[in-house]
Image (tube, grey):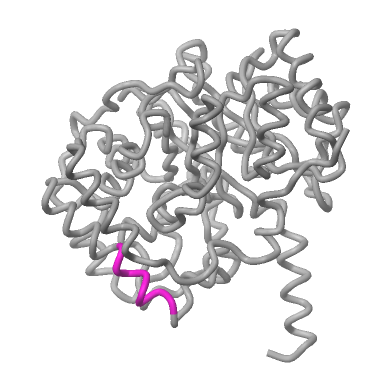
Amino acid sequence: MDNSSADHRRRQLLKGAAGFAAAPLVAGLAGCSTLAATTGSEGAAAGSGRNAGLSTDNTSVHGRRRLGNLEVSSVGLGVQNMSRTYQTTIPHRPEMINIIRTAFDRGVTFFDAAEAYGPHEVERILGEAVQPFRDKVVIATKFGWNIDQETGQRRPGLNSQPAHIRIVVDNMLRRLRTDYIDLLYQHRVDPKVPIEDVAAAIKELMDQGKVRHWGLSEMGLKTLRRAHAALPVTAVQNEYSMLWRGPEREVIPTCEELGIGFVPWSPLGVQFLTGAIDESTRFAEGDIRKVESRFSTENIKHNLALVRLIDQWAERKEATRAQIALAWLMARKPWIVPIPGTTQMSHMLDDIGAAHVTLSAAEARELDAAVHAIEVRGERLPEAVLQFSGVEAPPV
């Protein structure tokens, strides 16, 4: 690639970075299960993949978990890709509403969105879907990107100015067809706004009854501590899966110390852990996974050892790949609540069945040791997106 082409590609990544950022990232990264790549081994994926031999007729979520003092279903549903899949196709809106409502019927009470998803459109879909049972579910959404509130246009960088947060929340409430948000996250730390100022704005919204709990996503550890000291934080949302285990070093121990719940986005490793991606996969234009080095030709063959390990445990536990990947997360801590996302009904039913997969203490240790024996090669995100993670807020 010549220098001009490389510069152009970098500019495009930077321009779209707000859309990439998740709990997730590219309109669909909260652990989405939707197949959004063309794969050279489609037959193998279909025969041995997501729901092979699995009956989901009576599948429902088992149990509840607590994020701080907020009770939710043990598995949630990330709805990010319901307005646009990885490869930029637009899902059928009535079916997305059907999936959300069926998830609720099967015991899911925790639904995750953000103003950046769409932008705005995912909140509209979720609001319409849960309106008949709004008081029986927990809605999580996120602010923080610099998004025009009238047009939905993504502007450069971030915006957590208190005045902007107030406007954003009022607009979220309209899109979600509700008068309160159960869990409001700062999507990424704004390096220009002290976190104490953000906490004060959230506290004001809490006093008004518009927000009940708050959290942070992909923040720096010092910022997390400062935020919690200013206003108790209910949950942290970071990428976490067998494929990306970075939060284990410091974030999860800090959450445990402070009594903060943890919500992994992309708990299925952007479909990789379900077996939907292999060395023959060719990603569509606009699919962020195309520029993630963990899926490069030189790295993916090595990283597929994780899928082979999952296959062994899926057979052993009579479960699916997705269920093993999610059960591993849930066995890590009782206050970890994964939010796999999908645009397919069968995948949603598969995911929520993970709560029925039980690992004994010995099995959990055995699986965990096997997972950590496999070193994942490659970066989880492009540098233009990674630069927004681990940021510390400025001093007051």
**Residue 165 included in the magenta stretch of the image:** no
Q: Residue sitting at 44 percent across and 66 percent down?
A: 37
Location of the N terminus (image quadrant): bottom right
Q: Position of residue 158 (x, y in %)?
A: 80, 45
- State the predominant SS element of the stretch in magenta: helix
Residue 91 as seen in the image, left or right of residue 212: left
User: Residue 276: x percent and y percent?
Assistant: 34, 62
Q: Nearer the viewer, residue 308 or 76?
A: 308
Answer above or below: position of 10 versus 189.
below
Q: Could you say where residue 66 lies in the image, as x and y percent from the top left?
A: 43, 21
Residue placed furthest toward the front: 257
Q: Quadrant of the C terminus?
A: top right
Q: Is residue 77 left or right of residue 182?
A: left
The residue that appears at 54% across and 45% down in the rendered structure is 250
* View extreme (bottom): residue: 2
Of residues 314 and 93, which is closer to you in this image? 314
From the top left corner, tell me how far across and down residue 132 is, in percent.
48, 14
Above or below — where is 281 with respect to 335?
Answer: below
State the residue at coordinates (57%, 28%). 140
Residue 37 vertical placement versus 330 (above, below): below
Magenta range is 299-306
Q: Is residue 274 left or right of 243 when viewed as pictured?
A: left
Q: Is residue 212 above or below residue 307?
A: above
